[in-house]
Image (cartoon, coloured by chain):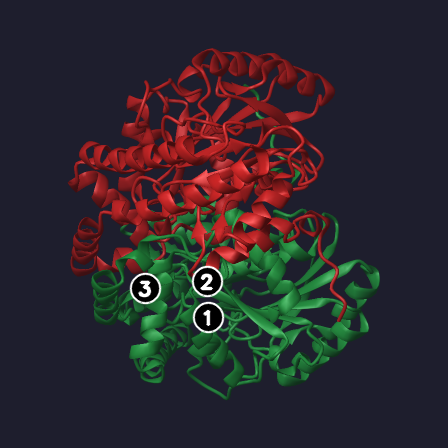
Chain colours: A red, B green
Amino acid sequence: MNYVFSDRIAGLQASAIREILKFTAFPDVISFAAGNPAQEAFPIDDVSRISNELLSKNPILALQYNITEGYTPLRDLLKVMMAEKNCFSDNDELIITAGAQQGMELACKVLCNEGDTLICEAPSFIGSLNAFKSYNVNLVGVELEDDGINLEKLEVALKANTNTKVLYLIPNFQNPTGNTMSLEKRKAVYNLSKKYNFIIIEDNPYGELRFAGEDVPSIKSLDADGRVIYVGSFSKILAPGLRVGYVSAPKEIIQKMVVCKQVSDVHTNIWAQAICEGFLQTCDLDAHLHRLRAVYERKCKIMLGEMDKYFSKKIKYTKPQGGLFIWATLPEGSNMLEFCKRAVEEYKVAVVPGTAFMVSENDKTNSFRLNFSTPTDEKIVKGCEILGRMTREMLD
Amino acid sequence: MNYVFSDRIAGLQASAIREILKFTAFPDVISFAAGNPAQEAFPIDDVSRISNELLSKNPILALQYNITEGYTPLRDLLKVMMAEKNCFSDNDELIITAGAQQGMELACKVLCNEGDTLICEAPSFIGSLNAFKSYNVNLVGVELEDDGINLEKLEVALKANTNTKVLYLIPNFQNPTGNTMSLEKRKAVYNLSKKYNFIIIEDNPYGELRFAGEDVPSIKSLDADGRVIYVGSFSKILAPGLRVGYVSAPKEIIQKMVVCKQVSDVHTNIWAQAICEGFLQTCDLDAHLHRLRAVYERKCKIMLGEMDKYFSKKIKYTKPQGGLFIWATLPEGSNMLEFCKRAVEEYKVAVVPGTAFMVSENDKTNSFRLNFSTPTDEKIVKGCEILGRMTREMLD
């Protein structure tokens, strides 16, 4: 039979970048291409203890159907935590999702018709961009600067696309750049959302992983008008295999997301939700985050130090204050894709070409993403030395 | 702010039926309205043992990201099991989903554009129908008879809707009717799928729960042409809280579903997948299913016996050979919705009005659904006595 797929999915092709990522499966490849949290940061003993308790005391809870909104004790804890950060008001509700990824997919599904405009930072997180594309929205990328999205260009895009429904932002330690949006820009985009009447999706999976600088208030905390959908996750602070995230947003929006989640997966795995609840309830989250931040700070410092040591001075790169990623940019005129291909094919070091994070793979970028959370310290040193030699041979 | 939602989700309203279902939360209500498996059928000790082993021997597996396709050892086991039932060929692939529900949602998302026609049995499973509606398809219901969909009416619908992409069927112990499709009709719909060039989604969550009669070959087992998407689930044979289902379908379709699942939830909770794999690997599935079938057979017999004893003879009802549901039909001219409302509000017995399972709640039906797997034996007896008295007072 000759299969004809929906228009929305026809555009989501496996890409040239996947060819590069394939190499990361080989054991002799040093991969800076992942986005996995460091597994030494997983609280294995606590998870085991909480799981054993659950399965011995309340196994039916873990095994029977539950409500779509999420496990009530977990939702109640998160509402309190969100309220303490001014991210949950009386007008809000909170839903548990299968990771932050599902939060983005549901938000787009309930808000955007096909053809509606959704604006994002360029570059931005590929998983979210593909979720949006899978609903056939008009996805428009606006240049990302060191302190956040370019406001002039954002307003140009808003004027050019009067059907803009959503602006998607990752304000803290953005994926892929590691950049953090300034408070001024957060205020400015919020004001634009009022002026041009759109919703902001604030994706904050890395916010708790700040290891330098000062916290910046979330956009959600500025929201007096019910315009911000805040998406959080346990993937980076506890464990991504659990697939537990959450969304704090105005009640009307959450109601629609619940209906949509029900037809998608009925509810999130309840064992995983109970693990998260048990962790928040019985462990010292602050002490845990303190340990996590120390791990990421050390690994980031090692990578930046080695890049300083080995990379050609013609390469620019971000100095993140948290998160998992560094964004390196080759000088104008370089063939970035060729560089990334050679790095993995000839020198066995994998990074992700920046084109992977653009709205279209044809959009121009000279940058690539490096991850410092997954590789061992030794591999960070060795990989940076190899990449550095490549950059010097190419540029110096 | 005044929220404007997408067209696709605007149609998925909370319904009048929900008002009835709300009553089932009250402890004094006898609920025949659920669709939950009997919790005495959960293999709690096995799940605990498998979980403890996993978390002590391979905790990183349970906690780290995994691939979208699903946990490879589980997929390999399922491929063998499916192949033994002629439901997996060399042209097929298999993906793990977050319950069968996600299988339906992904299949519709990858195959149907907005406005494409998707034909289903009328009545059919509300969760699937809403998943299809959430992609704005033209959902067309075709009358379901005791031995499966009405073939003449199906062909009329196919001729009237030349853009039919998918036919959705639950051939075994259908939800809500409990009916099983005959082999002749399975062959006939497969032949129609070739003649009119559409895909069949064969939803089979209850197939292993046969407690009477003979197995009927699946439509997938008749498929020489790559036209059938087979959806299975661990919800009814192991535990629904795990949210683990699977889809066996032609490779090209699974590839698209993988892309779509990646943007939806990255992957299914890996602990739950490993529990399923451990269960298949270390437990006697046949003996477990034998026990399950005995539980459901007994409960079904009790309910049918009490209905025979107490119900007005003017009420017709199905005699399922498996599954969880009985479908009762009031005589022409009765007010079914009023009957269901009075049953729960005045007499504290909840059933689901048949309109809940129609393509539109305005479609006419005199039937209602009774579930025998969730209530205790005592509540089955008491609830049937009450409903029976109501029917006799109303009709005799």
Residue nearest the viewer, comparing A212 with A223 = A212
What amino acid is found at the position of numbered circle 3 in the picture?
Pro
Regarding mark 3 in the picture, which secondary structure is present there? loop
- Counting residues from the start of the chain, the first of labels 3 and 1 encountered is 1
**Label 3 crowd bin: few (<14), some (14–19), many (20+), radius 10 Å:** many
Q: Do the residues labelled 1 and 2 touch (CB within 8 Å)?
A: yes
Q: Relative to residue B263, is residue B234 depicted above or below?
A: below
Mark 2 burial class by Cα count in 10 Å: few <14, some 14-19, many 20+: many
Q: Which residue is painted at 36% across and 32% down in the image?
A: A305
On the question of residue B98 being in view, the answer is yes
Above or below, A286 relative to B155: above
Instruction: Tell me which chain the residue with mark 1 is part of.
Output: B
Q: Position of residue A121 (x, y in %)?
A: 57, 28
Does the image show residue B333? Answer: no
Q: Does residue B103 appear to the left or right of B375 in the view shown?
A: right
Name the residue rendered at 35%, 61% in the picture: B272
Amino acid found under the numbered disc labelled 2: Gly
User: Residue furthest toward the bottom?
Assistant: B214
**Which residue in the structure is indicated by mark 2?**
B70
Label 1 vs label 2: CA separation?
A: 7 Å
Q: Is residue A152 left or right of residue A53?
A: right
* Nearest the eye: A78 or B144: A78
Report helix, strand or loop for mark 2.
loop
Q: Which of marks 1 and 2 is nearer the N terminus?
A: 2
Q: Residue beneath label 1, please?
A: B75
Q: Are marks 1 and 2 on the same chain?
A: yes
Separation of disc 3 and disc 1 at Cα?
34 Å
Nearer to us: label 2 or label 3: 2
- Image quadrant containing the N terminus of chain B: top right
Percent x, y for residue B195?
A: 81, 74
In the rendered image, which residue does mark 3 sit on?
A: B375
